[in-house]
Amino acid sequence: MYGPEFARVYDHVYTLRGKDYAGETADLVKLIRSRAPGADSLLDVGCGTGGHLVHLAGLFGEVEGLELSPDMLAVATERLPDTVLHQGDMRAFDTGRRYDAVISLFGTIGHAYTEQELRAVFHGFARHLRPGGVVVTEPWWFVEDFIDGYISADVIEPDGLTVARVSHTRRDGDSSRMEVHYLVSDAERGTRHFSESYRHRLYTREQYEEAQRDAGFATEYVPGLAQGRGLFVAVRDA
């Protein structure tokens, strides 16, 4: 679960570390509209602080978000006061409607910790799609691509803050475990430390594809996008 301290620096951290929300949104829209040219409604599952929804709101008639963390959702609500945002778990959710497209980005799907949960997520996506609708999913790292012991370090200076971030990611059975430490300094409050720990299940590409087929999707994998993890694009049988 993403906590309140991280939620407030989340967008600064990832934008200044090179995440291109506008560019990723353009890729998403191209993939969706190439399969469903008339797509005009979209649900972002694991929407976080709304970084993609801010851009998607101007490109679709209706956009909504789903997020488990109340702290992340609070930031998204401040940014998108006129957008419907739901608090819920991707493994079991019901927004009460269907959409032309469902997206789940930034490795959120890796928080499905068993193959049964993974299938449940894609079945949930299918229930929320109109016939012929499109799902775009950014996987967590495939087992075969995961780097055990990976260390990352950055110092960024957004809006009067200095943020130092150091992370270490290791293999933990069938999952990865990422430990991230932050030092955040500003003139008023001085320096404070907090840490976050994330677990993601490591799946093979074939396991992702099988889970999507089980939910009734025809799927393909588009490599190279989403900072190297690629994207799955799945179409629900019309």
Image: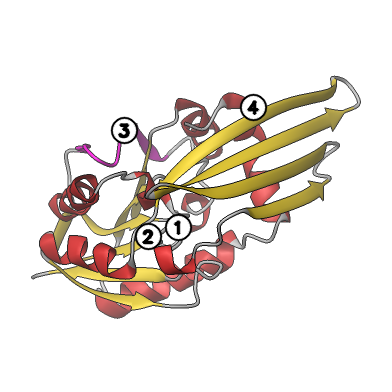
Mark 4 vs mark 3: which is more N-terminal? 4
Determine whether, in the image, residue 152 is placed left or right of residue 146: right
Residue span colored magenta: 83-95
Label 2: which secondary element: loop
Marks 1/4: CA distance?
26 Å
The residue wearing badge 3 is 88
Amino acid on which disc 2 is placed: Phe
Disc 3 to disc 1, C-alpha distance: 20 Å
The reply to whether dot 2 and dot 1 touch (C-beta < 8 Å) is: yes
Amino acid type at mark 4: Glu
Q: Is residue 49 above or below residue 87?
A: below
Q: Residue at x 56, y 67 (%)?
A: 227
Residue 162 among those drawn in magenta: no
**Label 2: which residue?**
60
Dot 4 or dot 2, earlier in sequence:
4
Location of mark 4 (residue): 5
Which of the pair 170/233 is nearer the observer? 170
State which mark lies toward you, 1 or 4: 4
Secondary structure of the residue carrying tag 1 is: helix
Furthest residue toward right: 187
Q: Going from the N terminus, do you reach mark 1 or mark 4 first?
A: 4
Give x and y (percent) for residue 93: 22, 37
Q: Secondary structure at mark 3?
A: loop
